[in-house]
Amino acid sequence: MSIKVNMSRRDFLKTTALQSALIKLILSVSIVQAQDNIRLNQVGFYPDAPKIAVFADSTIGEFHVVDAATNEIVFEGELNPPEYWELSGETVSIADFSSLNTPGTYRIEHDDAGQSYTFEIRDEILRELSKASIKAYYFNRASTELLEEHAGIWARAMGHPDDVVYIHESAATEQRPEGIVISSPKGWYDAGDYNKYAVNSGISTYTLLAAYEHFPEYYQNLHLTIPESGNGVPDLLDEIRWNLDWLLTAQDPYDGGVYHKVTTKNFAAAVMPHETNAPRYAVMKSTAGTLNFASVMAAAARVYEPYDPEFAATALEAAEYAWQWAASNPEQYYVQPPDIHTGAYGDRYLDDEFDWAAAELYITTGDEASWHSRNFSEIDVGIPSWHDVRPLAWVSLAHHRENLTPAADTTLIKNQIMQQGEELLEEYYRSPYGITMGRYGRSDFVWGSNGVIGNHSLMLLQAYRLSGDRDYLNAALANMDYILGRNATGYSFVTGFGSKPPMFSHHRQSEADGIEDPVPGIVVGGPQPGQQDGCTYPNDLPANTFLDDWCSYSTNEVTINWNAPMVYLLGALEVFK
Ligand code: G3I
Ligand code: 9MR
């Protein structure tokens, strides 16, 4: 661009300002693009752990790592040969700078690709995120106001007292006919929506209980600044209790069956919780909801025993009552009534729910009848999800293997976990991104794919805990890198963490509160090609179909069951790093 010599000073200044703005714009655009093309954990790395960035666009040649404060080159390396990943349609190359282990703040540079976001190397790098991922549950509490001293700028009024919940026609019994009122307060909102679902509560609450059960000392020292902090009970258990208290109210005291959900008839508009006052209903008792309840209560009975034996006894009794109901009603599949339009969590295959509940009851009570009620030598492992809870039975059995009665086959238990771990590890070695997503092909990229990778990691960590082989741990850590930016979209998928986090998640509170930053510590659903919401996506590749937009509830919503494995993973990484 040239400047005309005969222009006035004012015009000259204007032109120069324009030019420099243009130059800045061009520079910033190219930096943004470059940052998007170098995918790495945008939060950072533990000093002694593997450190990897992934370059898009078939990049080759040398890269270097630069100290962000001094601009000094502290590491030089060569990109690995590019490889094609069919699930993202990209050819990517890995930059490995694992041997850089001096704490500091850095960025990566490459002559063609430009520079990455800055990141840190330090001890306890995931500690704040570990806390925030649990605090997310506090932010989703129903039936309470969030005070500024706990919630900061996200303080809000109480929503959904749920002391008036109507028995829906589908749930009517002689003792509790249609339209009578029960009280069913507390609990966490499921997700971006404000309803409470027993099935999804099952896996979510269990996974948090497992985090505590497996790493009690870590959580005894993790302070979350919630209303119960300082009451002598670890904050994580206080938070879980909020949901257990709700779940207990979802059991029909007359027969032990559990309502599938407490819900409005339709999804609320994008308003704050206290701005919705549509009636709430307890809808149909289901075998799936009841068995999830039984499993969680049986596990809770163990975990709360040292802190509140009375509650532990109540939980166990409730679990056994639920089990009995399910045994006499094994095929009450959830059917969405015609006037109810909220989440269905429908599941027509319930063997896994029976397996899981039997395992939890057996572990807690030592009653061999529970073990023998299922044929464990025929039960697979797999990856946990709200509709496949078999693996959770194995997770609990493996953790308790040394205290089981002789009926249990501890070799089988160990082999099952290790086989699952090895299956995932193969993909970690093979994957162009160095992650386990893609082990089960396109089907890893379903609605809630970030929950899928979280649960891959949960299983990898069980294999690590049994074998001590750090490759399993490193694979789980790599999956956390994926969540925090080493993925095909270039986003860190957790609100409030990383340089490019989601800002417009499908979370009603975050959408409605008028605060720029969404409620932090929440992982969004993640890429998947279904496009069930009808939004306009840039492409339909499984690992790339993602939109940071309120519109995108199929990729950008949040839920308690996707955060839970992330909570577990973060705690485990902070313990084992
Ligand atoms: O199981 C099939 C699998 O066999 C098939 O290969 C695959 C191909 O698409 O689909 C699988 O089913 C998917 C199912 O989840 C299980 O993963 C469906 O396509 C998919 O549409 C379905 O999505 C569920 C979604 O609700 C819609 O029902 C999500 O898992 C579930 O997390 C989500 O849950 C919602 C609640 O209903 C309401 N609250 C928010 C929450 C999160 O969005
Ligand atoms: O907001 C709802 C979200 O929480 C659910 O997961 C999703 C799928 O069941 O549905 C969303 O609600 C949408 C509804 O299904 C269709 N109309 C638009 C709603 C979102 O604004």
Image (cartoon, helix red, strand yellow):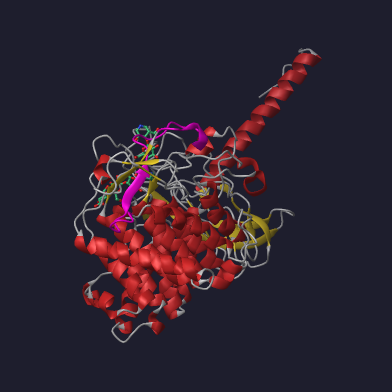
* Rendered view: 511 above or below 351: above
Q: In this view of the protein, can residue 429 be seen by the observer?
A: no
Relative horizontal placement of residue 446, taking residue 556 as reference (left or right): left
Residue 54, image x and y in percent? 49, 55
Q: Identify the residue at image location x=64%, y=58%.
A: 120
Give the dominant element type of the magenta stretch: helix, strand or loop: loop
Residue 254 is situated, as x and y percent measured from the top left of the image, at 30, 56
Whether residue 366 is situated above or below residue 190 in the rendered picture = below
Q: Is residue 237 left or right of residue 24?
A: left
Q: Which residues are magenta?
A: 252-278
Number of numbered tags placed on the structure image: 0
Considering every residue shown, the one lying at the far bottom of the view is: 406
- Residue 289 is situated, as x and y percent measured from the top left of the image, at 31, 55
Q: Is residue 253 magenta?
A: yes
Give the quadrant of residue 409: bottom left
Q: Is residue 245 left or right of residue 370?
A: right
Figure check: 474 above or below 200: below
Residue at the image point whose x is 22% and y is 74% from the top: 373
